[in-house]
Amino acid sequence: MVDIAHQAAINTASARDAAPAHAPVPLAAIDPGQWRALAQRAVEPNGYYLPAWELAVSASARGRTNASALPAMDGSSPRLIGLMPVISLWRALKIPLPALVSAHPYGTLCSPLIDRDAPLEAATRLLQQARDAGAHALVLNDVALDGAAMQSLNQVLSRDSLKPRILSSYIRASLDATQDADAMLRDALGAKKLKELRRQRHRLEEHGPVAFEVARSADEIKLALETFLQIEASGWKGKRGTALVQHDGDAAFIRRAVPALAETAQCEIVTLRAGATPVAAGIVLRHQDRAFFFKLGVDERFARHSPGVQLTLDLTRHLCADPAIASADSTASADHPMINPIWRGRFAIGDVLIPLRRNDPVVALIHAALVGLNAAHETARRVVRRLRK
């Protein structure tokens, strides 16, 4: 009934439009070969919109299943030149207005895939696909505001006298992996902090030789994934019920996505061990020349030795030593207390409302509804923070 009601809202709001509404296609209907080829040509990397990852999310991840897609095809060939996974505004936020929202891929980056060989055509066709679906606006969550994908969309919007609105934004940590790791870490942390971290590492060695391991092959990564899942569930995420392995759909998604990406060298799992004991582990995606630090799990029994920081220092050296990687996205929240002091690069992430028609009163309604919802969420967050103190 909800889907029928939502479609009725879209059709009613779109009644004056000349073009009939065509629903976005199911994400699973996108040809995976075309999708992979587009990802190789993407003007901006996004490891979370690689097909092996996003299809696994859409298949089973809790609250993220059955996503749709806006595909952009080349006008002169059957080549896929753009892809934007989406869901309805009603499904995303229970707002009964005609808009489409980025399908959340579990990682905090929703920049669409746009072909670097035809960026403006791809952006134009993606926006037209949204209009043809009956949407009056697109809500792109967690996009790189100054990234190449958003720049392509902005050029087309400016040409059509349409102005996007930034709903919220924050600055996120990133790594310039072209630098010398040790010099960069000295500059970032300072000699005193590094000395303290070395002391903590020596104390960790009392539990056995400390080793940094990178799992890449199919057999290695399956074992490493189970280690990661156990570590993540053993800590505060397990206590809050947010660890991946605690939910069947999330566990199925990650166990499908990680090995599939490992087959194409687009995922690795890093683990820090003290003797035979894994004390920290992280999942890292790779797309083109960028890495994405998806999740970190630590064994909190070793918290006094800062195992998460120790792993991140080793990961930093690992990525800086890899000539295939130029940068890494922390995919972390704003002012993250662990990663921000170590990775000193910064870029802007935000939620953007894109109008699809000029002077459209429906867009004003959508904007007002989103602003009101954001204000309500912020009030709720402040109350929760006070209750936890």
Image (cartoon, helix red, strand yellow):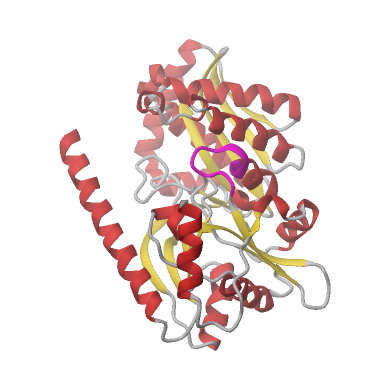
Highlighted magenta segment, given as a residue range:
57-66
Extreme right residue here?
77
Residue 202 pos. (x, y %)? 45, 20
In this orientation, which residue lies closer to the viewer: 284 or 243? 243
Residue 30 pos. (x, y %)? 72, 55
Residue 28 pos. (x, y %)? 69, 49
- Residue occupying image coordinates x 62% and y 52%: 49
- Residue occupying image coordinates x 50% and y 76%: 14
- On whether residue 186 falls in the magenta region, the answer is no
Q: Is residue 104 left or right of residue 365?
A: right
**Residue 319 in the image: above or below residue 374:** above
**Residue 36 in the image: above or below residue 139:** above
- On whether residue 63 falls in the magenta region, the answer is yes
Q: In which quadrant will I find the C terminus?
A: top left
Residue 345 pos. (x, y %)? 46, 56
**Residue 226 in the image: above or below residue 255:** above
Type of secondary structure dominating the magenta stretch:
loop
In this orientation, which residue lies closer to the viewer: 370 or 51? 370
Q: Quadrant of residue 97?
A: bottom left
- Residue occupying image coordinates x 76% and y 73%: 74
Q: Is residue 145 visible?
A: no
- Residue occupying image coordinates x 42% and y 62%: 350
In this orientation, which residue lies closer to the viewer: 341 or 19? 19
Q: Is residue 276 visible?
A: yes
Q: Quadrant of residue 94?
A: bottom left
Report the label total.
Answer: 0
**Residue 275 in the image: above or below residue 257:** above
